[in-house]
Image: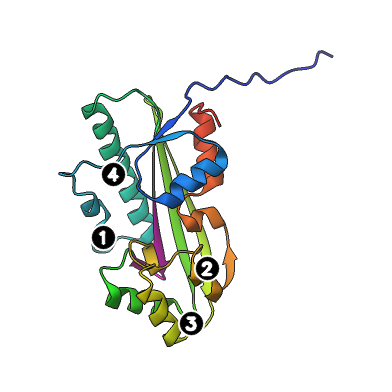
Amino acid sequence: MRATRTIVSDPLHHFVWLASQSPRRRQLLDQLGVQHRPLLADEDEDAEALEATRPGETPADYVARVTRAKLAAARARLERRLLPAAPVLVADTTVALGTRILGKPGGADEARAMLHALSGRTHRVLSAVALHDGRRAGFALNISRVRFARWPTAEIERYVASGEPRGKAGAYAIQSQAAAWIDHIEGSYSAIMGLPLHETALLLRRARVRF
């Protein structure tokens, strides 16, 4: 019997455009060995408006809609700037407590309220990633679970005062001091950070990106 062999296509793309200003996502792509270049919003783009919630929207529907909207905006940006063709990668992460979506806090009071709500409870972290290789789009969603121990009020105040909750879904980052109060996670640590690496790697391989 003749042995069969699998033919693996050579990588077609040597870098991706990353439409995110998150240092955590850059770090995670570096961890995979993916070359990436920034594709950030223009000054006249209202990037925050894409993340506005809609009445009755489930957390999964929300994060999928926002991620796809980010991808469409990033592809239009690439075309408008006449940049070299390469796959475009976007991601979005949100925290859900039941059906309640906890996005980025608007200030210290909102951050404080979110952290008190999460204290002593289990919540979900929904992290979506999308990639367009110039011909087709790929999308993936990871849902992980995080349980906080009881977080003393004084420690919440100290964390809020540090400024760490700013710009973070659910008002915390798992790789920050908040980790001292996390007693269990179920799922993907990288997804909780902001980019599900397993799902991202699958999309990159499908798009024939070198890493």
Labels 2 & 4 near each other (Cβ < 8 A): no
Image x and y of residue 191, in percent: 50, 54
Mark 2 to mark 1: distance in Å?
A: 22 Å
What residue did someone put label 4 on? 69
Q: Which residues are magenta?
A: 92-102
Give the mark toward the camera: 2 or 1. Answer: 2
Tell which circle, 3 or 4, labels the residue nearer the N-terminal end: 4
| Displayed quadrant of residue 160 | bottom left
Mark 4 to mark 1: distance in Å?
A: 13 Å
Under tag 1, what secondary structure?
loop
Q: Amino acid at mark 4?
A: Ala
Which circle marks residue 151 in the picture?
A: 3
Q: Amino acid at mark 3?
A: Trp
What residue did someone put label 2 on? 146
In the depicted structure, whether residue 204 falls above or below residue 28: above
Tell which circle, 2 or 1, labels the residue nearer the N-terminal end: 1
Labels 1 & 3 near each other (Cβ < 8 A): no
Mark 1, Cα crowd under 10 Å, few <14 / some 14-19 / many 20+, is some
Choose between 88 and 67: the one closer to the eye.
88
What residue did someone put label 1 on? 53
Which circle marks residue 158 in the picture?
A: none
In the depicted structure, whether residue 116 falls above or below residue 107: below
Per the picture, the main secondary structure of the magenta-coloured stretch is strand
Q: Is residue 139 left or right of residue 69?
A: right
Image x and y of residue 146, in percent: 52, 68
